Image (cartoon, rainbow, N blue to C red):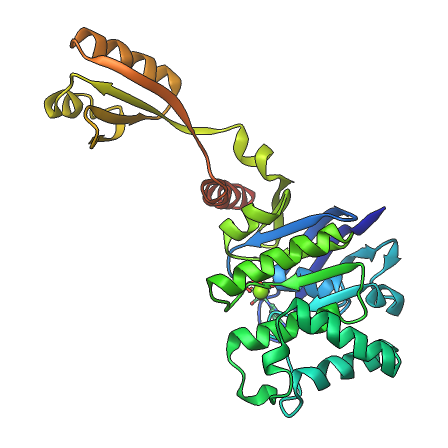
Amino acid sequence: MVAIVTHSLSKTFKSLGKASVHSVTDLNLNIEENEVFGFLGRNGAGKTTAIKLLAGLLKPTKGSAALFGVDTRLAHARSMMGYLPEHPYFYEYLTPRETIAFYGRLRGLNSKERKSEWERISELLDLRDIADRRIRGFSKGMRQRVGFAVALVGDPPLLILDEPMSGLDPLGRRMIRELILQLRDRGKTIFFSSHVLSDVEEICVRVGILVSGRLAACDRIDKLVGNTAKSVEICATGLDDLFCRKQSNFILEYEERKEGGYRLVVRDTELANILAMEINQQGGTLLSMHPVQETLEDFFARIQDSASDIALAEG
Ligand SMILES: Nc1ncnc2c1ncn2[C@@H]1O[C@H](COP(=O)(O)OP(=O)(O)OP(=O)(O)O)[C@@H](O)[C@H]1O
Ligand SMILES: [Mg+2]
């Protein structure tokens, strides 16, 4: 079963006397049930707009989206989804316990179900210590946890989370990462946006990258970064600084290693082989030569550049 499908989903904001903003353009997504999908993009790329379209909070200008086959314009689609907004809004005078009960009522749970929902969710998000304090005095991280808790009310099969780790300290972030994996293990589908690429690399198999409202890449992380070696690293002994400086026109960087010898980095294997011959001719000894894989961050930076080149070419 497919959890999320979008067809040419687009949103343009128009305001009188101002240029239109094309926040999301022709977005085609296919998120499988039980997948943890990371939605990436720079500030202003259109992530929140796309998420609000999925959550049925914005109406598409063009195209459509469906959750488990149900169009997001229908109320039934919303009942299958838990949503964490980018800036969660609360009734400040309620406590977390009352807030969860309030959303439980909205979800149609009876009093016994609401009580057991509180037990389940407060345990998952470690809310027991702050259960009966008013949200008004809460820190950013506490609010984020309550926001996540609200998304879990009613145990929906799909969670759509707009920056769930935002504002959390390292331990809080780890708690959310572990919780997302735990939810996946219980069969849930999780679609979330984030700026923290290391968090995404740790818990997602597939990611989508938005650049200026368009999906510039969407694939398994290992496929996106696995095919490209960004450089080749050579370690060798019997060299000196003068040798390295002489090769500086094709060496990207070099350094003397603590354990002896030099570490030299070149752009590709062809240059690495030429350098290996030079090292040999100088009487040096080659210790190792291996490709340096691109990281998700390298890929993310590269795709921004190539996508903006395409945008320029399109005029
Ligand atoms: N209600 C609105 N009216 C006009 N423009 C809007 C509106 N909401 C969003 N935008 C514009 O749409 C673009 C995408 O914004 P969006 O909030 O979706 O980005 P984002 O990827 O979530 O960014 P961030 O990482 O900063 O949260 C921006 O140019 C923004 O100014
Ligand atoms: Mg956003």
Residue 55 is situated, as x and y percent measured from the top left of the image, at 75, 65
Task: Report which quarter residue 41 is drawn in.
Answer: bottom right
Depth check: give the residue in front, 241 or 11.
241
Question: Where's residue 229, x and y in %?
Answer: 45, 28
In the picture, measured across the screen, residue 19 lies left or right of residue 270, that is right
Above or below 120: residue 274: above
Question: Is residue 24 something that shows in the picture?
Answer: no
Extreme residue toward the left, this view: 242
User: Residue 166: where, in percent of width, then height?
Assistant: 53, 66
Residue placed most toward the observer, 51 or 161: 161
Residue 60, located in which quarter of the rendered image? bottom right
Residue drawn at x 29%, y 17% as measured from the top left: 287
Q: Is residue 103 above or below residue 44?
A: below
**Residue 293 is drawn in which quadrant?**
top left
* Callout count: 0
The answer to whether 91 appears left or right of 171 in the picture is right
Residue drawn at x 68%, y 60% as measured from the top left = 50
- Residue 30, relative to residue 258: is it above or below? below
In this view of the protein, can residue 248 be seen by the observer?
Answer: yes
Q: Nearer the viewer, residue 17 or 292?
A: 292
Q: At 12% from the left edge and 22% from the top edge, which residue is drawn?
A: 240
Image position of 254 (left or right of 116): left
Please name the residue shown 59% across and 33% down the image: 223
Q: Residue 157 at x, y = what percent?
A: 80, 59
Q: Quadrant location of ligand 2? A: bottom right
